[in-house]
Image (spheres, rainbow, N blue to C red):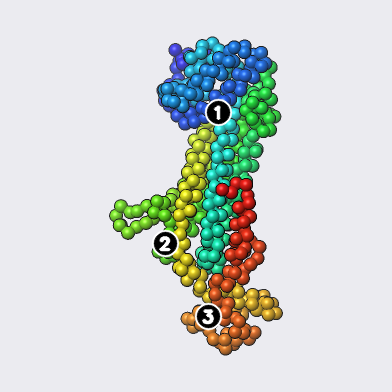
């Protein structure tokens, strides 16, 4: 006896190797709640349209609720791989438990519109959670920015010391990035908020269904998908989410790279809480930033998920193809990975302690204030290009004679920069330098505190 729900036209049972290859219930079982939600809305619609009796619909709804409870309390037992996926496991168990009414549930529905609907319902919930987690990481960054609004450190370009900034300014840069990421997540959510249910296998149905009713019951913001062929073929929303997560993981990976360097003995600028670092099984002295390294490493795997899904989709003829079953593991993996990292990063960052003295020492190299000197000349009437050139010559002189800018006497400085006065010798203090960059969006503590206030007024700030 062929046990598959679609087995009518088949003379022999499915080969065991095929069953193993094609089953998805081992991973798509996580859609159970959304599958049941959908089935309840669907069968209520069937009753409203007179396609099943009110009594049958009530039995289905009660049976589905019972299955949901059984899955959650563990009494459902094993899912059956011969039933392929979560959809057929639930439908078949329902029919076993309530009899004939269960056999009416799949009226005017295909697994093609069913899986597309389940996935959108599931992702709606997950994306809302991801947005909340991104927001909560942002609020940790704002807290850190406030704590470190005066902590002066070198800013880099090309991994070369550039100009002094404060550590708070650095954290607010990431607050901006995660803000855009949260925005991309909510755009993704908005675009996927259409209901595919009722599209059937690809061409809807001859039965008089009401797609607006089911869409409304399931809370889809924009109503039913307008084109049944598109509705069962479209995985743009999955790709968009994978891309959005990839971009955000790129941010997680970049901050990781900085933290790893800052924790190195070469920099020695920060301490991360012991609870967020790991030791060595051989070298007793080690304290390693493994969380950051894992974040950097896992970013590669999240990119891989995006590329796998894009490649899986690119050659598919309309409409549904079984290839598309491969979307789920990629999605689930990226969501799980991203979720875990957003959570751990928030907690880990809150343990970050800067070594202010070491950061300040690094920022005190007077070469970092060379631009300040050029800008002083600008304020005294020298065209910027000319000022840049002359300070460059001064720096060249210093490097040739093995001295620092602040070790030159005024007379020596005046040989190359005749306009220089005693005021120039006071420009080499990194604290003053950073305070002087008091421009909107700049690193001056006052600006950083203003930005902190801006972020604290956002509704999500906790
Ligand atoms: N498990 C399938 C998937 O995830 C559901 C749709 C199957 N449809 C079909 N005609 N085989 O894509």
Crowding near the residue tagged with mark 1, few <14, some 14–19, many ≥20 C-alpha atoms within 10 Å: many
Question: Which of disc 2 and disc 1 is earlier in sequence?
Answer: 1
Question: Is residue 268 in view?
Answer: yes
Nearer-the-camera pick, 312 or 200: 200
Crowding near the residue tagged with mark 3, few <14, some 14–19, many ≥20 C-alpha atoms within 10 Å: some
Q: Is residue 136 above or below residue 287?
A: above
Task: Provide residue 73's location: percent of width, then percent of height.
Answer: 44, 25
* Residue highlighted by disc 3: 406
Task: Provide residue 241's location: percent of width, then percent of height.
Answer: 58, 41
Task: Provide residue 147's location: percent of width, then percent of height.
Answer: 52, 59
* Residue highlighted by disc 2: 264
**Residue at (45% x, 17% y) in the render:** 13
Crowding near the residue tagged with mark 2, few <14, some 14–19, many ≥20 C-alpha atoms within 10 Å: some
The quadrant in which residue 101 appears is top right
Mark 3 lies on a secondary structure that is helix
* Residue highlighted by disc 1: 34
Mark 1 lies on a secondary structure that is helix
Q: Is residue 409 above or below residue 238?
A: below
Nearer-the-camera pick, 454 or 85: 454
**Residue at (62% x, 47% y) in the render:** 459
Question: Is residue 304 in view?
Answer: no
Q: Is residue 442 above or below residue 35?
A: below
Task: Provide residue 237's location: percent of width, then percent of height.
Answer: 60, 37
For ligand 1, tell me if the residue under mark 1 lies within 8 Å.
no
Are dots 1 and 2 in contact, CB under 8 Å? Answer: no
**Residue at (44% x, 12% y) in the render:** 1
Mark 2 lies on a secondary structure that is loop
Question: Which of disc 3 and disc 1 is earlier in sequence?
Answer: 1
Cα separation, mark 1 vs mark 2, equals: 47 Å
Cα separation, mark 2 vs mark 3, equals: 28 Å
Question: Which of disc 3 and disc 2 is earlier in sequence?
Answer: 2
């Amino acid at each position: 006896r062929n046990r598959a729900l679609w087995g009518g036209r088949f003379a022999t049972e499915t080969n065991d190797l095929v069953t193993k290859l094609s089953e998805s219930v081992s991973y798509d079982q996580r859609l159970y709640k959304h599958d049941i939600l959908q089935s309840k809305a669907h069968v209520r619609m069937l009753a409203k349209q007179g396609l099943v009796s009110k009594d049958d619909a009530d039995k289905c709804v009660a049976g589905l609720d019972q299955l949901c409870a059984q899955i959650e309390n563990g009494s459902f037992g094993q899912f059956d791989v011969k039933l392929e996926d979560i959809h057929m496991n639930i439908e078949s168990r329902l029919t076993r438990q309530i009899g004939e009414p269960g056999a009416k549930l799949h009226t005017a529905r295909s697994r093609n519109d069913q899986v597309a609907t389940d996935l959108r319902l599931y992702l709606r919930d997950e994306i809302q959670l991801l947005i909340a987690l991104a927001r909560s990481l942002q609020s940790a960054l704002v807290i850190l920015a406030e704590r470190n609004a005066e902590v002066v450190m070198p800013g880099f370009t090309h991994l070369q010391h550039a100009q002094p900034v404060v550590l708070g300014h650095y954290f607010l840069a990431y607050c901006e990035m995660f803000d855009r990421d949260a925005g991309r997540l909510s755009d993704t959510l908005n675009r996927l908020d259409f209901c595919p249910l009722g599209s059937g296998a690809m061409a809807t149905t001859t039965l008089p269904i009401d797609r607006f009713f089911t869409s409304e019951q399931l809370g889809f913001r924009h109503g039913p998908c307008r084109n049944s062929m598109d509705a069962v073929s479209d995985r743009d929303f999955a790709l968009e989410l994978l891309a959005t997560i990839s971009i955000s993981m790129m941010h997680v990976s970049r901050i990781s790279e900085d933290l790893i360097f800052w924790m190195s003995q070469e920099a020695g600028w920060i301490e991360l809480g012991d609870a967020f670092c790991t030791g060595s099984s051989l070298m007793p002295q080690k304290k390693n930033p493994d969380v950051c390294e894992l974040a950097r490493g896992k970013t590669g795997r999240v990119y891989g998920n995006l590329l796998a899904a894009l490649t899986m989709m690119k050659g598919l003829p309309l409409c549904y193809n079984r290839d598309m079953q491969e979307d789920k593991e990629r999605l689930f993996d990226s969501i799980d990975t991203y979720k875990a990292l957003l959570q751990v990063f928030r907690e880990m960052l809150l343990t970050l302690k800067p070594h202010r003295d070491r950061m300040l020492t690094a920022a005190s190299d007077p070469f970092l204030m060379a631009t300040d000197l050029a800008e002083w000349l600008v304020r005294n009437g020298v065209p910027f290009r000319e000022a840049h050139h002359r300070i460059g010559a001064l720096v060249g002189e210093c490097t040739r004679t093995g001295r620092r800018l602040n070790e030159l006497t005024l007379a020596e400085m005046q040989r190359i920069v005749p306009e220089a006065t005693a005021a120039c010798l006071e420009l080499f203090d990194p604290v003053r330098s950073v305070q002087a960059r008091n421009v909107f969006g700049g690193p001056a503590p006052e600006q950083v505190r203003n930005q902190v206030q801006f972020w604290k007024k956002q509704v999500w700030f906790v």
